[in-house]
Image: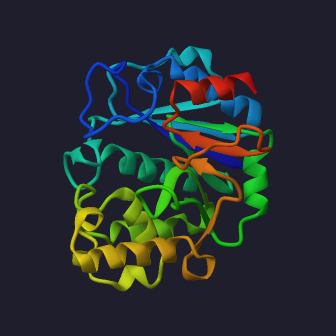
């Protein structure tokens, strides 16, 4: 079994940002956090390769320090999903770029771990892959504002063209339908045939859209309603975190959570 771990990269050492809100400790947005991210990968996973898609970032880690790392730099910073240029924001471009990189490789799986997420538990990725019952695996959205989580995802290589086609078929910009909702739509045969207008502004929409949002949560987090299965562990953005779990991952960690992680 071969898998490539992918991630995105944007950093200006937290001097400025184009996102509507910042979550977690400021350390997450500084270049030094890449050391912790990489060390978590090294301790808990055995990737065939690590590929990072850089959104033309002004600040980068010292790439000579890291083994088995492929750094792909884009020609521009597309921006955050709440404020971006073009159809796709930076994270979606990172997804699409790294998905095709994996598809054109000899790896069996694309494993995405976001740049501000940490994993814990030796063999965590192998454990998740063994539990896969569908060609994709995402974090569940319960306890978060979105129907699914994207900070830890797995997609089988042979399913990548199908998923990319379904994702790119959605014509709305990322600021109109968030990347999380787009992934939920693209992975559901039911949601993918619904008119896109139903999903635009869904997170702050009408009563009908709120009903649709709940339905989307249900479809995205119910195994038989989606082409994706759920990660067999928490937490992503969901809280609280049990740092004694054998396997877990978390995103947007605050100072206390980062300290608890380091002490385990």
Q: How many dots with numbers?
A: 0
Q: Residue at x 60, y 15 (%)?
A: 65
Taking depth in this image into account, of 85 and 114 the one nearest to the observer is 114
- The answer to whether residue 116 of the structure is visible from this angle is yes
Colouring mode (rainbow / by chain / secondary structure / one colour): rainbow
Above/below status of 168 relative to 240? below
The image quarter containing residue 51 is top right
Q: Residue at x 62, y 22 (%)?
A: 259
Taking depth in this image into account, of 54 and 101 the one nearest to the observer is 54
Taking depth in this image into account, of 20 and 79 the one nearest to the observer is 20
Q: What percent of the width, then of the height, locates residue 49?
A: 65, 38
Q: Residue at x 31, y 73 (%)?
A: 210
Above/below status of 204 relative to 69? below
Q: What percent of the width, then of the height, locates residue 127?
A: 78, 53
Side (left or right) of 192 relative to 127:
left
Q: In the rendered view of the protein, which quadrant contains the C terminus?
A: top right
Q: Residue at x 51, y 61 (%)?
A: 141
Above/below status of 212 relative to 264? below
Q: What percent of the width, then of the height, locates residue 36?
A: 60, 23
- The answer to whether residue 187 of the structure is visible from this angle is no
Above/below status of 8 relative to 177? above
The image quarter containing residue 168 is bottom left
Q: What percent of the width, then of the height, locates residue 139?
A: 57, 57
The image quarter containing residue 23 is top left
């Amino acid at each position: 079994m071969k898998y490539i771990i992918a991630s995105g990269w944007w950093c200006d050492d937290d001097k400025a940002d184009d996102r509507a809100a910042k979550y977690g400790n400021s350390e997450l947005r500084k270049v030094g956090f890449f050391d912790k991210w990489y060390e978590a990968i090294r301790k808990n996973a055995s990737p065939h390769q690590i590929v990072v898609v850089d959104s033309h970032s002004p600040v980068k880690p010292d790439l000579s320090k890291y083994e088995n790392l492929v750094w792909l730099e884009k020609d521009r910073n597309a921006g955050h999903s709440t404020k971006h240029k073009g159809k796709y924001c930076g994270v979606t471009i990172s997804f699409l770029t790294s998905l095709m990189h994996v598809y054109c490789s000899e790896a069996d799986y694309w494993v995405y771990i976001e740049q501000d997420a940490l994993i814990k538990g030796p063999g965590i990725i192998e454990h998740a892959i063994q539990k896969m019952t569908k060609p994709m695996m995402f974090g569940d959205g319960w306890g978060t504002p979105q129907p699914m989580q994207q900070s830890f995802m797995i997609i089988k290589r042979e399913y990548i063209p199908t998923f990319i086609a379904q994702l790119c078929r959605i014509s709305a910009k990322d600021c109109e339908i968030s990347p999380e909702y787009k992934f939920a739509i693209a992975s559901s045969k039911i949601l993918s045939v619904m008119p896109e207008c139903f999903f635009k502004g869904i997170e702050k929409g009408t009563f009908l859209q709120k009903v649709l949002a709940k339905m989307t949560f249900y479809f995205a987090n119910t195994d038989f309603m989606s082409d994706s299965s759920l990660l067999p562990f928490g937490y992503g953005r969901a809280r609280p975190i049990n740092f004694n779990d054998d396997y877990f991952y978390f995103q947007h960690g605050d100072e206390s959570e980062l300290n608890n992680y380091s002490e385990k």
